[in-house]
Image: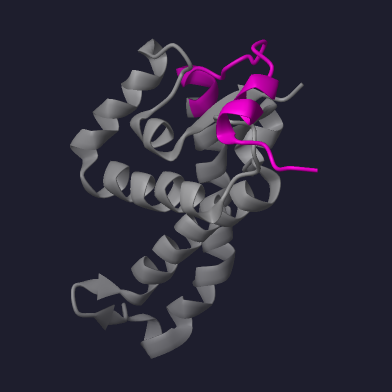
């Protein structure tokens, strides 16, 4: 049996997809932040007892800041790769899919979950671009457009 080309695979994707809009994605993200805050509290609290309670600096960064960033990006990357959803998306019944219906690839997710989130967090003016989700036809953010992903309701 031959493999499908991207064009043939996209023909098999149902046109009845219901795209998750700005507010559903926003609430899912807030739920994820609560989960991450809890995880960081559990994982990073023991570090407060290192160095007699003083902050451990590594140049411009703190040890907890570095570890917190690693937990943040790995949470989104690994949850989305394994389940196509984070806990926030699971609760709200939405998931990330590729445009052509194929399984999510590491390259898609690295851009979407790491590079995209990095720019949104570090250069906070880019967070204003997230409003594009509210106005695009398929409810895509810039990171979705470049990563060829969509956020849809689970059937």
In this rendering, position of residue 137 left or right of residue 13: left
Q: Is residue 127 visible?
A: yes
Q: Is residue 27 visible?
A: no
Foreground residue among 22 and 41: 22
As drawn, 137 above or below 119: above
As drawn, 153 above or below 59: above
Q: Residue furthest right?
A: 1
Q: Position of residue 7 (x, y in %)?
A: 57, 28
Q: Residue furthest front?
A: 2
Q: Position of residue 107 (x, y in %)?
A: 47, 53
Foreground residue among 55 and 104: 104
As drawn, 8 above or below 147: above
Q: Residue furthest bottom?
A: 51
Placement of the N terminus among the 4 image quadrants: top right
The residue depicted at 37 percent of the width and 11 percent of the height is 135
Is residue 33 a member of the stretch shown in magenta? Answer: no
As drawn, 60 above or below 141: below
Foreground residue among 8 and 145: 8
In this rendering, position of residue 57 left or right of residue 1: left
Foreground residue among 83 and 66: 83
Q: Position of residue 115 (x, y in %)?
A: 35, 51
Report the magenta residues as a range: 1-25
In this rendering, position of residue 20 left or right of residue 50: right
Q: Position of residue 145 (x, y in %)?
A: 39, 30
The residue depicted at 40 percent of the width and 20 percent of the height is 133
């Amino acid at each position: 049996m031959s493999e499908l080309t991207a064009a043939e695979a996209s023909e098999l994707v149902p046109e009845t997809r219901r795209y998750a809009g700005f507010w559903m994605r926003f609430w899912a993200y807030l739920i994820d932040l609560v989960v991450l805050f809890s995880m960081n509290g559990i994982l990073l609290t023991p570090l407060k007892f290192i160095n007699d309670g003083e902050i451990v600096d590594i140049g411009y960064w703190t040890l907890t800041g570095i570890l917190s960033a690693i937990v943040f990006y790995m949470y989104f990357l690994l949850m989305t790769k394994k389940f196509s959803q984070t806990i926030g998306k699971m609760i709200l019944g939405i998931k990330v899919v590729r445009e052509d219906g194929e399984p999510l690839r590491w390259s898609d997710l690295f851009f979407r979950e790491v590079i995209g989130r990095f720019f949104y967090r570090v250069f906070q003016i880019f967070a204003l671009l997230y409003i594009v989700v509210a106005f695009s036809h398929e409810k895509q953010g810039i990171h979705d457009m470049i990563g060829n992903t969509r956020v849809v309701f689970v059937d």
